[in-house]
Amino acid sequence: MEVFKHIKHLLYRYECVILPGFGAFITRSHSAVIQPDGLLVPPGKTVFFNRQLQTNDGLLAHHLAHAEGITYALALEKIRLFSARLLEGLNQGSIIDCAPLGHFEVKENGLLRFEAANQMNLATKSFGLTSVLTHPIDRSESDTPIIPIHRAKSGAQSLWRYAAIGLIALSLGGYGATYRYNQSVMAYNQNLEAQAQDYVQEQIQQATFTPNIDPAIISVTIESPQGPYHLVAGAFRIEENALRKVAQLLKKGHEARIIGQNKYGLHQVVFSSYADRAQALNALSQIRAKENKEAWLLVQ
């Protein structure tokens, strides 16, 4: 079904896509794992389904309207009819194929179960990676061949013994001389380091001062962040009408502004913008309940 293909396309970029009136598809990232059968699965994103999230957030409808070249209202109506057909099919006890995401089925206890499609990886960082069958490493001990040692004759042993004693004596003498030299170098370096530290402290004391600055004249202006989630109040072909709408919303206390023109040449006016998706959805619910039922969420 085309709607499920649009949902899969959105799941590459978003962690949650809501199908209004039916439920939400949620992704969860996982690391690479080796299954019991030896199959190495690359890192990716697994799809889950949540029946409790059904409120329209505008994401799917906006994407569907843009992809198929239809109005937002028509996209909402198309989604509503699609959800109604899904619920009707599930009430009849049939299995609903939602390729390429997976399939739905109703269990004996009346619970709805979603089974994600195999070999589906929605992580863009793992694009092109496939599962690989691994083979266990044979760690069984093997017999180590024994190499015989041939002993030298007694005369040669005595000669090598005296040579080793002489070499040890020379090494000890050289070590003593090297140790004394290293001690003298370390003492010299410590003396230079102490002199350098004294000089640095003296320069720091000379350069230390307290600036006479009045804290009252220092002001910092921090602008509130504007995120990708916009609560759209309307779109106007004439810019003067869009500016008039912004002025009305500003009087009501909104952080209204014009975010530009869409592909149809309409000036889009928003109530406010948010960096967090949850805050944007909460504000959208309040605006729909108190002020404008036609407000919707735009994600850029």
Image (cartoon, rainbow, N blue to C red):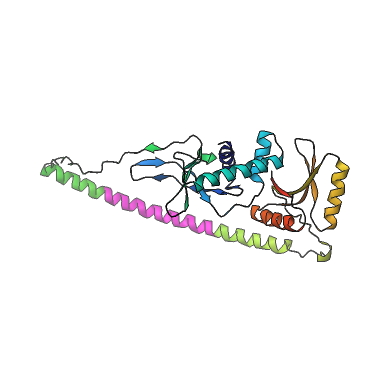
Residue 278: horizontal and vertical position, in percent? 64, 55
Question: Residue placed at 52% from the left, 49% from the top?
Answer: 49
Q: In front here: 113 or 225? A: 113
Tally the numbered discs: 0
Whether residue 13 is visible to the viewer of this picture, yes or no, is no
Residue under the point 63% across and 62% down: 198
Is 59 situated left or right of 260 in this image?
Answer: left
Closer to the camera, 200 or 11?
11
Instruction: Measuring from the top left, give residue 110's x and y in whole percent.
Output: 46, 53
Main secondary structure found in the magenta portion? helix
Which image quadrant is residue 60 in?
A: top right
| Residue 187 lies in the magenta-colored region | yes
Q: Judge by depth and name the residue closer to the eye, 50 or 39.
A: 50
Q: Give x and y (percent) for residue 14.
A: 59, 45
208 part of magenta stretch: no
Q: Position of residue 105 (x, y in %)?
A: 46, 46
- Residue 84 appears in which quarter of the rendering? top right
Q: Is residue 109 visible?
A: yes
Quadrant in which the N terminus appears: top right
* Res 221 → quadrant: bottom right
**What is the span of residues highlighted in magenta in the rendered image?**
167-190
In this rendering, would 178 be left or right of 7?
left
Q: In the depicted view, which residue is nearer to us: 297 or 198?
A: 297
Q: Residue at x 66, y 34 (%)?
A: 68
Q: Is residue 214 above or below residue 157?
A: below
